[in-house]
Structure formats: structure tokens, C-alpha cells
Amino acid sequence: MSRRTERLGSTIRTELAEIIMREINDPRVMGMPSITRVKVTEDLSIADVYVTIMGTPGQQKAALNALKHSAGMMRGRLMKSLSLRIAPYINFHIDENLKKELEVLELIRKANEEIAEAERKRAEAAAAQEPPPSGDAPTGEQPPTNN
């Protein structure tokens, strides 16, 4: 990605977030979809917009369809607000990276729990193998001597 496409992607991300927040009144868009990143092609003709949407998979799909449906209106608003001769076509996608990150974090958490459980069992086993202290061991006092 060139510096120009990165800057345009960042600007589009900000502007689209504003447009979605203020102008999209579709009931399928529940909550607030978060735009995680925008990738603009080198020729600036297409902007791939990655979003995360809270809810069930059905709600996510419905919200994504609503965003795709209003992409033309958003493109027109972008053209006006960014003073572009031609605004890029907007393609919305569900960002799967967040799901993958959450899955990896869950796996790490489970691995840490398993390690802690194994260490606890090892410590219990080591404590069970130690002989109990006997009464003949010195306790800090000297036994009486017969002189």
C-alpha cells in the first residue's frame, strides 16, 4: 500500500463511521458497527471496508446487507465530503480477524488453566511424598543430658 492509499483509507474510515452513525436509519443495523480497517486499491477505484458487528450471525448478516444496500448513498456522501472527482466503490466485509483473535485468546486462556492445574497436581503429589515430621527430630530445644 502506498502512502496515498493509506491516507485515503484512513480518511474514508473516519467519514464512513460518521455517515453510519448519523445517516443510516436502517433497523437491520443494530448497535454500532465498528469499521476496523479500510483497504483502498492502488487505482483508488475500490475501497474494501472491514466491519465488526455485534450480535448473532443472523443479525450480523442482516446488518452487513443493510450496509451493502446503502453503499451507493455512502459513496455519494464521500464524494462530497472528501472533494473527490470519483469516489471509490465501497465493498463491505465482516472482519474475520477479530474472531480469530478472540479464538486465539481463548486457547491461550485454556492452556494457562491447564498448566496451572498440572502444577497444582504436581505440588500436591510432591507434598504427599514427603515424610511427615517425626517426634525425634530437633524442634529447636536440646534434649536433657544425664551428666
Image (spheres, rainbow, N blue to C red):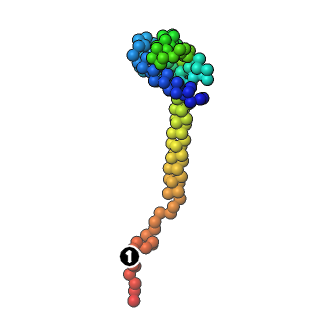
- Point out residue 9 in the picture as x, y percentages from the top left corner: 53, 24
Residue appearing at x 39%, y 16% in the figure = 22
In-front residue for pair 35/101 = 35
Inspect the image, locate mark 1, and give the three-letter code of the amino acid beneath it: Glu
Residue appearing at x 56%, y 20% in the figure = 47
Residue appearing at x 43%, y 13% in the figure = 24
Q: Which quadrant of the rendered structure holds the N terminus?
A: top right
Q: Which quadrant of the rendered structure holds the C terminus?
A: bottom left
Q: Residues within 10 Å of mark 1 (few under 14, many from 20)?
A: few
In-front residue for pair 9/105 = 9
Residue 72 visible in rendering: yes
Residue that mark 1 sits on: 141
In-front residue for pair 4/124 = 4
- Point out residue 108 in the picture as x, y percentages from the top left corner: 54, 39
- Point out residue 142 in the picture as x, y percentages from the top left corner: 39, 78
Residue appearing at x 45%, y 20% in the figure = 15
Above or below: residue 147 compared with residue 46: below
State which quadrant residue 43 falls in: top right
Above or below: residue 42 compared with residue 76: below
In-front residue for pair 78/140 = 78
Above or below: residue 16 compared with residue 143: above
